[in-house]
Image (cartoon, rainbow, N blue to C red):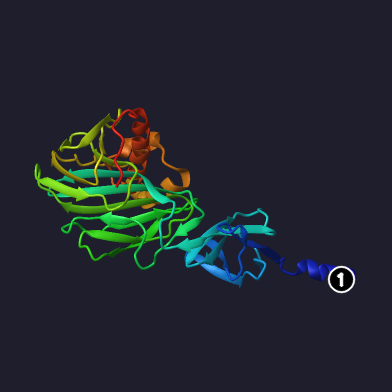
């Protein structure tokens, strides 16, 4: 018996990952969901170890040797839901949430939309941040028509989009042209909770020349932002003042279109010779901003450096604060 006990102790320890998939739209266990177990942290990124289907009672079980941080991905209705398993956390009796999907927005809406204009030389970089909230119990997912709609001028570059799902990290999102030449759609599910979209593109710039744009999404609040040193001329904007540290100026847009004329150019960022942190910041800025959240104190000194998504997030918080300070401003009309 002692020999048998020693042999059993020498075998690899297998632990079962089990639990129930719950459909939060119905409040009931969900059958037929695919639960995949992934390892993390290796040079190839995520690697699928094993997967299982939830049964008629929503139950699933995966038996694998647990080593290091793990990720569970639950696929249902064309949407993937992530569940982290840090080392030492329970692996039995898990509750994995999924939602029914709809091609209609439902309760999903854009609460805040910030547009930052940074002209320099013959080009202007445009950074847009959309803060979207879904207070419903259904995920908005339309693989054919997309979810968020973006306006990009016909002479602009193809937009680059990074999306951050509720509780997730920013990842690249696919964008597709629509039947309208200046409207793009984003192929990304908007789950219940808060989702952020960060968009960047460039357009030709000539100082003082009018630049027209429109809002393709249905926003509750839209803000136009220019850095210190840039003057903006336009009608129908609500002046919300300047941010004290950077003097970036913020304007509230009360319509679904705008026509502005900018003068001035953003000064190039000073070279950080010998500091060695510029390259590392540009390589890790996106994930860091998503993991730790926007922090004005840390971000504002770098407002003119090459970190557009962090900048968009920071100015998003700034816009939210100024909006509260200027509650007396005219209410935004419905669209």
Residue 279 point in image, percent of width and height: 33, 49
In the displayed structure, 32 sits above or below 146; it is: below
Q: Which is more toward the observer, 210 or 312?
A: 210
Residue reaching furthest right? 1
What residue is disc 1 on? 3
Q: Quadrant of residue 247?
A: top left
Q: Residue at x 71, y 68 (%)?
A: 12
Q: Residue at x 79, y 66 (%)?
A: 9
Q: Is residue 320 left or right of residue 262?
A: right
Q: Which is more toward the observer, 68 or 131?
A: 131
The answer to whether any part of residue 64 appears in the image is no
Q: Which is more toward the observer, 9 or 189?
A: 189
Q: Quadrant of residue 20?
A: bottom right
Residue 295 point in image, percent of width and height: 41, 38
Residue 169 point in image, percent of width and height: 45, 53
Q: Which is more toward the observer, 146 or 84?
A: 146
Residue 276 point in image, percent of width and height: 34, 45
Q: Is residue 187 left or right of residue 263?
A: right
Q: Residue at x 25, y 40 (%)?
A: 253
Q: Is residue 156 left or right of residue 293?
A: left
Q: Secondary structure at mark 1?
A: helix
The answer to whether any part of residue 8 appears in the image is yes
The image quadrant where one finds the N terminus is: bottom right
Q: Mark 1 Cα within 10 Å, few/some/many (few <14, many 20+)? A: few
How many marks overall? 1
């Amino acid at each position: 018996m002692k020999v048998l006990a020693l042999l059993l102790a020498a075998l690899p320890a297998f632990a079962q990952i089990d639990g129930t998939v719950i459909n939060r739209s119905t409040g009931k266990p969900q059958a037929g969901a695919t639960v995949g177990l992934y390892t993390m942290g290796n040079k190839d990124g995520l690697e699928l170890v094993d997967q299982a289907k939830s049964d008629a009672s929503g139950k699933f079980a995966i038996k694998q040797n647990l080593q290091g941080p793990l990720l569970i991905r639950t696929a249902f209705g064309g949407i993937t839901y992530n569940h982290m398993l840090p080392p030492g956390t329970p692996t039995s009796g898990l509750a994995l949430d999924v939602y029914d999907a709809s091609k209609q927005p439902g309760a999903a809406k854009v609460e805040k939309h910030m547009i930052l204009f940074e002209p320099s030389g013959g080009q202007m970089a445009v950074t847009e941040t959309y803060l979207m909230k879904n207070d419903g119990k259904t995920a908005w997912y339309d693989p054919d028509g997309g979810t968020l709609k973006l306006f990009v001028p016909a002479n602009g570059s193809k937009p680059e989009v990074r999306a951050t799902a509720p509780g997730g990290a920013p990842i690249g999102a696919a964008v597709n042209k629509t039947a309208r030449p200046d409207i793009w759609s984003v192929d990304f599910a908007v789950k219940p909770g808060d989702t952020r979209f960060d968009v960047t593109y460039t357009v030709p710039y000539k100082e003082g020349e009018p630049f027209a744009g429109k809002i393709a999404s249905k926003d509750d609040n839209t803000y136009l932002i220019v850095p210190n040193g840039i003057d903006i001329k336009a009608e129908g904007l609500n002046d919300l003042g300047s941010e004290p540290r950077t003097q970036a100026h913020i304007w509230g847009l009360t319509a679904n279109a705008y026509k502005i004329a900018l003068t001035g150019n953003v000064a190039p960022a000073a070279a950080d010779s010998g500091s060695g942190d510029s390259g590392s910041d540009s390589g890790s800025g996106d994930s860091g901003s998503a993991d730790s959240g926007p922090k004005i104190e840390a971000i504002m000194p770098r407002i003119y450096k090459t970190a557009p998504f962090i900048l968009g997030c920071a100015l998003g918080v700034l816009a939210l604060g100024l909006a509260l300070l200027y509650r007396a401003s005219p209410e935004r009309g419905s669209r």
